[in-house]
Amino acid sequence: MSTPKAISTARAEERTQRTRSSGAWAIALVALLVVTSLYMIFLYAPRERVMGDVQRVFYIHLPLAWNGLLAFAVTFVLSILYLKTRRAGFDRWAAASAEVGLLFTTLMLLTGSLWARAAWGTYWTWEPRLTTAFLLWLMYAFYLLLRRYIENKDKMRLMAAVYGIVAFINVPIVFMSIRWWRTLHPVVLKSSGFQMEPEMVQTLLVALVSFTVFYGLLLWERARLAQVEERVERLRERIREV
Amino acid sequence: MAYLFAAFAVVWLAFFAYNAYLVRRLAKLEREADLLRSYLEERGS
């Protein structure tokens, strides 16, 4: 007769195999896109005349920013859906997207800071785009803290959903800040199109696709982890009741 | 060039670290879930 531990190990191995095969295609696609992006960033895109090679940071900085905003938009939509349906799945995916979005926003701020040091001579300045982006980071860091410190699950989900909707107000402000106020940031995308060489635009678009697919993969992994965390918590509760 | 290298290094190290954290924690929790379920099945509840 098999022991609980032996059954557990067999199940875990079976599930790991399933996960590996289903995730293998996604990982292969991300790897292919990342390699293509790196090739285009360093070998295909021309050297910018004023800033030189450091301008290549732009090809990861903008996709990081775009995916941060996309992730918070996803949290916003899923928070509304949670309030309408009260289905825990929407809340789980909303939280996963906020966490991944915070990672992208953190990296956007860090890469921006390094680029600023090379281009402007300072790591940080309180101009409108940087200030609103930093506020955005703070707001979603607080969203994750809120979820951690409210013990009652239903109350936590409700408050997180409301907060996830309210915090989204800052997303269009961050996007529009360089158009509404005088800032150091250049406006890359105008109504007439991208203000760059065609090779630079192509490189940027490939990097955008790569990072967006990568965001999707991380979101899927994080949501799956949250699902298993909830399952373990339910099982622990059942054992406490036995 | 140092800033360019630092920016790319920070991004990819952070992504790999986060991804590794997710994969390892998922594997650990799946093992725990199966162990707890087997325990409950043995207890007949």
Image (cartoon, rainbow, N blue to C red):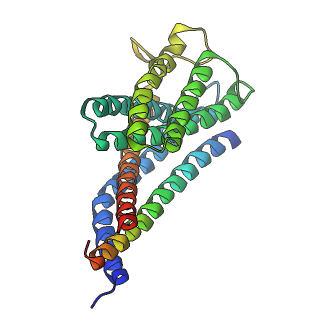
Q: Quadrant of residue A95?
A: top left
Residue A206, can we see it? no
The residue at the point 61 percent across, 49 percent down is B9
How many numbered marks are there?
0
**Which one is nearer the viewer's eye here, A184 or A205?**
A184
Q: Nearer the viewer, residue B25 or A143?
A: A143
In the picture as drawn, the residue positioned furthest to the front comes out as A241
The residue under the point 27% across, 60% down is A22
Vertical placement of residue A181 versus A152, above or below: above
Quarter of the image where the N terminus of chain B is located: top right
Outermost residue on the right side: it is A121
Residue A150 as seen in the image, left or right of residue A115 = left
Task: Please tell me which residue is depicted at 44% across the width and 67% down the height of the picture.
Answer: B28
Please tell me in which quadrant of the rendered image residue A17 appears: bottom left
Residue B25, horizontal then vertical, whole percent: 46, 61
Q: Measured from the top left, where is residue A194 in percent x and y?
A: 43, 20
Nearer the observer, A96 or B20:
A96
Q: Is residue A75 placed above or below A37 in the rendered structure? A: above
In percent of width and height, residue A196 lies at 48, 22
Foreground pick, A228 / A240: A240
